[in-house]
Each structure stands twice: as structure tokens, then as C-alpha cells.
Amino acid sequence: MSSSPSLNTWSDALSGFSIGWFPLGLVIVAAIPLVFIALYALTYGVYGERKISAFMQDRLGPMEVGFWGILQTLADILKLLQKEDIVPTAADKFLFVVGPGILFVGSFLAFAVLPFGPAFIGADLNVGLFYAVGIVALEVVGILAAGWGSNNKWALYGAVRSVAQIVSYEIPASIALLCAAMLAGTLSMQQITLMQAGPGGFMHWFLFTNPIAWLPFLIYFISSLAETNRAPFDIPEAESELVAGYFTEYSGMKFAVIFLAEYGSMFMVSAIISIAFLGGWTSPLPNIGGLELNTMTSGPVWGAFWIIMKGFFFIFVQMWLRWTLPRLRVDQLMYLCWKVLTPFSLIAFVLTAVWVINH
Amino acid sequence: MQELGKVESNSTRIIRQDDKRVTIEKDLDTEHMVLSMGPQHPSTHGVLRLECITDGEVVVEAEPYLGYLHRCFEKHCEKIDYPAIVPYTDRMDYLAGMNSELAYCITVEKLLDIEIPRRVEFIRVIVSELNRIASHLVAIGTYAIDLGAFTPFLFCFRDREHIMNLLEWISGARMLYNYIWIGGLAYDVPADFKKRVDEFVTYFRPKAVELYKLLTENEIFVKRTYDIGIMPADVAINYGWSGPMLRGSGVKWDLRRNDPYSIYPELDFEVPVPDGKFSVVGDCLSRHLVRALEMEESLRIIEQCLAKMPEEPNFNSRALIPKKIRPKAGEVYGRAENPRGELGYYIVSDGKSTSPIRCKARSSCFVNLSAMKDLSKGQLIPDLVAIIGSIDIVLGEVDR
């Protein structure tokens, strides 16, 4: 399964469509996931988080705006849009303004290589996984710029913590993803997904086809929580310690952009973990004899459905953890990274290599 | 504890990390930074301000600054009548108004030397124990928030709401009750008071267990509080600590037992003191543990009071309240076990005036907070937050 000509015909046809010199089709293909995610992240991510946290905490959550408060996020966006765009007098204006931008770009550029189905992919790079891991590191620059540029002591603490955390956790995360890349034999996101496609549904997923994959799977999941600054690793924005961490001074639309980037990252790491270990856009349902469930639930639209469902599932787990666990301390976080996750990821790496050689 | 934060040489500094002392090497000689924490900060529980001198994340020194909520309680007392002071005591420790009122009223009653009806005593103990549970719920909930766990906080407030409703039902107010009066009560309790308090006790027992499992036994929570901010028993006594703070350091000192007042001698309850198995005696976890266990003891007290409370139809709770309070000349110190420790009132009367010529409140939070400087030396900023939370201050009482 090294290539998939039939799967891509639909998207090829759309990509070929252009008005004059302007490749309209290509832009649409590349933009669909992004537009979806932007919409999702702003409305349903925030709304979902509020509702899920509310139900976990024995309350109702937003109920006033629209049916069951479904328009609450839109109302919040409108409010944020109307707010005055404040830049503190003592702030480094350039870094302060550019920080959220870099953060946003860093978190959303990775969507270009996420396959949302056999036909939906922005750019099927042959180093897709590498690109995704690398481009996320750009967020560090944005966080540091925001924290330093704010000229606020709390923001500086948050930024320094965040950089230390993200840079450290990239090591176990990358090694864990490397295990998946070894199993697939490629770094292309689309190819990794196709390696896990088949009539058996979930039985072809890396998590279930070999006895080692659960280890890098768990390691990547834990590291991804730290990389996206989610609880119990939300140390950079630890509200009870650092007020709001690196975005203490932000308000209005800049704050919204930082928020959007955070929810974008949440979905991105969820999608990456689904692609690397849980078959990306492939259907989990197996063909059972004459009942061809897998064939019935495969295709471009189903593909997008499945990966989004998998992404939602991991986002739900992230929220679940966030509203259950207290926060770790900085040194405990580093201990976990360097003395637990990194050695175990190396072990997983060796075991996966041995397994790949012997199969 | 004294050696924490001590600079050993130019390049090393001792800090506490987990359960052992470690030495950090400083490869760069950096300057200290002054960090003003509060008065507007999420985890300073009101308007406390800490001026921290930090070396990276390590707090070299933290100095608490008070007075942002100062309302001249003691001066006011010299101008108003004895009964009119009761609402002011509510506003000191606003999370435990009933306990503050009780402490004040038993002090004045001691000065007046009057007898209180038994039914009044029982009702007083029930409401103050209910208030103690409510206060501990806030302490535990906000402590959870300080450590990053949001859900236990809302669970605590959900359960506290039931107590608020009960107290509102009997006194008309949710937090500032003005219910316990000198010589009696503002009102007798409503007819089915026993039933509703009993319902609450049966409702709350499993919730307290749930809270214990969710928060106190949580691995991360234990890691964040275990062996942090240790206060040895002798230093705690020297500082004048009281209440859950002192008991957290392993001293079995509870005024309800050691200097009994009201009907506490008749009641059977334990004074929980950490034994050092689950926590290090004197650390933040011990202090939290004492509060968590005390709630169960309060439930036991309430149950016993409900069973023993004499039923008196057409009971007039104001019958024995003196018309004009003018104590004979003298001075008195009365104290009671508040959720936060010993709340004492020192009242001087000249025998002529209807208001005290001096009314000094000995605030437990203020005394407990005074150890902040010692506790915070050499701690990390996250640990500093954990320590402030474990002291469980109410700034209304600290500043008065």
C-alpha cells in the first residue's frame, strides 16, 4: 500500500480546478480542515469544555444564550471583538503583538499535513510527521515573545516555565511518534494512515497489531498534554500561582487568538495520536462475514467523520483529566519527563525496532 | 526549617524538594527579583499581599503585608452597645459567623455571669458546628483550587449550599447571621429543624467520603502537599498557633476539650491529630487532613446534639436576654474554638457604660499567618501557594 491513486482522484479533480491563474480548488482543499477546525475550536471546543466541566461538577454550565447555551461562545466572541485592544505602556509592543500571531500560526500550520480522509489533506508531505512535530515547536517562540513582551513578572515566569516544559516534552513525544513511523516505515501522514487501513477495521491499527505500541501511545498522550499546556501540566498558565501565566496582560481579540491556538493545538495532538496509533481516518468497524461494515463506513466523508470523532474522543479525555486532577509542580513535571517518560520512550523505541525487524 | 534557603557558598543554595533536601548549583550569578504577590492575586484568599524576594522560582523571603481590609472593629466596639457588637463579629470571620458570635456571646455572658437555657446551648452548638463544616468546606475547596483542582472546589460549594440554606432558614441570613445573642438566640429554631438537619447529616456523610477520595487521596495532591511547609510542634506553640494548624503539627489542643465551654463536655467526639503515617506531621497535608477529618467529628457532634436537645413547646429564646447590658466593672477573656483556631475576646467594662471600654479580639488567622515568613523561606513559588492555602486565612479576621 505505497500509493493510493484511486483515493485521491476526487481531491485531485478539485485541486485542478482554477480560475485563470488562481488555484481556487487547491485553496479550498487546503482550507476545508482549517475552516472546520477554526469553527470547531471556537464554538464547540469551548462550549464542549464548559458543558463537560459543568456536568462533571454537578452544575449546568451555560444555559441562557440559545438552546442549552449553544450560542454562548458566539456571544463571548462578540464581546471579545468589542473590547479595547490594550497594549500595556511598559510592554515591548512588537513582541507583544507578534506573540499571539506566532502562537496561532505555529498551532495551525500543522493542520496542513493532517489527513482528514482519503481525499482531504492539505499537503501530503513525505516528512509530514516530522513537519508536524517541528512546526509545533514554533509555539515556543510565540509564548516566549508574549511572556517577555508583556513586561510582567508573572507572564515571564509563565513563559519561562512553558518553554522549559514544551522543549523537554518534545523529546519523549518525538521518540514515541518515531515508533509509529517505524511501524509504518514512512513519515507521511497519509501513508501511515493507509498502513492501518483494511477490512478488519480497528484490528489493523498499530495499537492492536503489535504488543508494544501501547507504550509509545501512552507516552505520546501524556507528553501531548504537557505540550499543549493542559492539566495536570498546565503549569505555564497555572492560574492560582501565576495569575494567568504568559497571557496575563492579554485581553480582547489577542486573548481570543491565544485561546484559539490552544484549542487548535488540542485538536492537533488528538489528531496526530489518532493517525499514529489509531488509524487516522479509517473506520474502526470490521467486516464481519457478509456484513461489510468497514466498506460501508469508509470514504471521504466517513474518513473526516472518523478522524474528527477520534479527535473529539481524545479532547474529551483531555478535558476529563483537566477537571479531575490537581496540577503538578515544575520540578515534578521535569522529573516525569526526564526520568520516566524519556527512558521509557527509548525502551519503546528499541522494542519497536526489534519487533519491526522480526516481522 | 531554619536552614532552608540558606546560602551555603556563592554557588549553592539548599531548598526542599519532595522528601529530601537537595542542593541546587547556580552556574550563573543572577540577581534577586522582588515579586509582589497580591493584594489582587487568585491564591492570596482575599487581599493579602506578600512581597517575595525570589531567586528564579525559589522564594528567598516572603513578607506578608496586611491591613487592606482593616475596619476598626475594636474602636467601633468602644462606641456601641454590647448587643450591637454581635453583627460586627459576623463580619470578622465571615465564613464562620456563628462561631464568632458564639465566642463573643460566651465572653460577655462570662462577664455578666448569667445562666443560659439548655435548649439554647444545644442550638448554639448545632449551628456553630454546621458553620464549622461550611467553613472547612470552603477551606478545602479553595485549597484544591490553589493546587489546580477545580472540581473539588465546586463539590465543596455545592454541599456548603445546603448548610447556607439551613442557616438562612433559621436566622434569615446566609453568612452574616446575627443569630446568637447575649443570653439567648434571636429566634427559636423552626418546628422541623431536627428533621432537616438530620437529612443534611445523612446527605453529607457520603459526600465527605467522596471528597476525601477525590482530593485527599489523590496522588498529585499528596505529592504537592506532602512534606511542604513543615512546622514543628514547639515552633508552632511559640508562634501561638491554634486550631487545625496546631493540630496539624501534632499537638492535641482543642478548646472544646481543653477549655470546655457550652455543652461540649457532655459530647463524645475525637480531636483528630495526624499520626505521621499518611503525612509528615506538621506539613501542609497534615493541616488539610485535620480539616477533612474534623468535618466527620462535627457531624457526630450535631447528631448527638439533635438526640439530646430538649423539646420545649412555646420556647422563648429571648426570655433571658437582659434588657440593658451594663456589666459591673471588670475584665474578662473568653475564647472558643473557631474553625481556624482560638478566637478570643478580651473585654473590659468600667461598670457605668453600656459599651465596653476595650474589646480586643484575638484572631486565630492573624496569629497563624505570622509564621508565614518562616514557612516560606526557600520554598518554590508553587509551594508558597500551597502553604498560604493550608493556613486557611480569612482576611476579614486578620485585618478586622
Image (cartoon, rainbow, N blue to C red):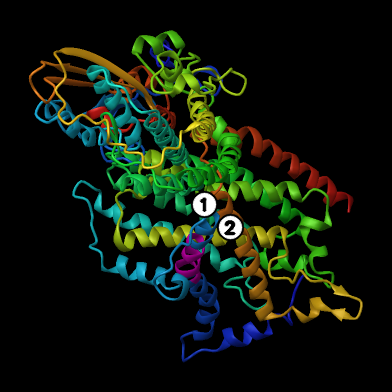
Q: Which residue range is magenta in the image? A: A40-50
* Quarter of the image where the N terminus of chain B is located: top left
Q: What chain letter is assigned to the residue under label 2?
A: A
The answer to whether residue A37 of the structure is visible from this angle is yes
Check residue A285 in the rendering and tell me which mark sits there, or answer none. Answer: none
Chain letter belonging to callout 1? A
Q: Amino acid at mark 1?
A: Thr
For the residue labelled by badge 1, is the local secondary structure a helix, a strand or a loop? Answer: loop
**Occupied quadrant, residue B80:** top left
Please identify the residue farthest to the right as the structure is shown. A289
The image position of residue B19, as x and y in percent, is 56, 20
Label 2 residue SS: helix
Q: Nearer the viewer, residue B235 or A3?
A: B235
Q: Is residue A72 above or below residue B255?
A: below
Q: Residue furthest bottom?
A: A20
Residue A304 to residue B177: above or below: below
Q: Which residue is mark 1?
A: A228
The x, y position of residue A201, in whole percent, is 80, 69
> Do marks 2 and 1 share a subunit?
yes
Secondary structure mostly taken by the magenta-highlighted segment of the chain = helix
Q: Residue at x 42, y 10 (%)?
A: B3
Q: Are marks 2 and 1 in contact (CB under 8 Å)?
A: yes
Mark before the other along the chain sequence, 2 or 1: 1
Q: Nearer the viewer, residue B63 or B90?
A: B90
Residue B309, horizontal then vertical, whole percent: 47, 33
Tell me if residue A42 is in the magenta stretch: yes
- Identify the residue under disc 2: A269
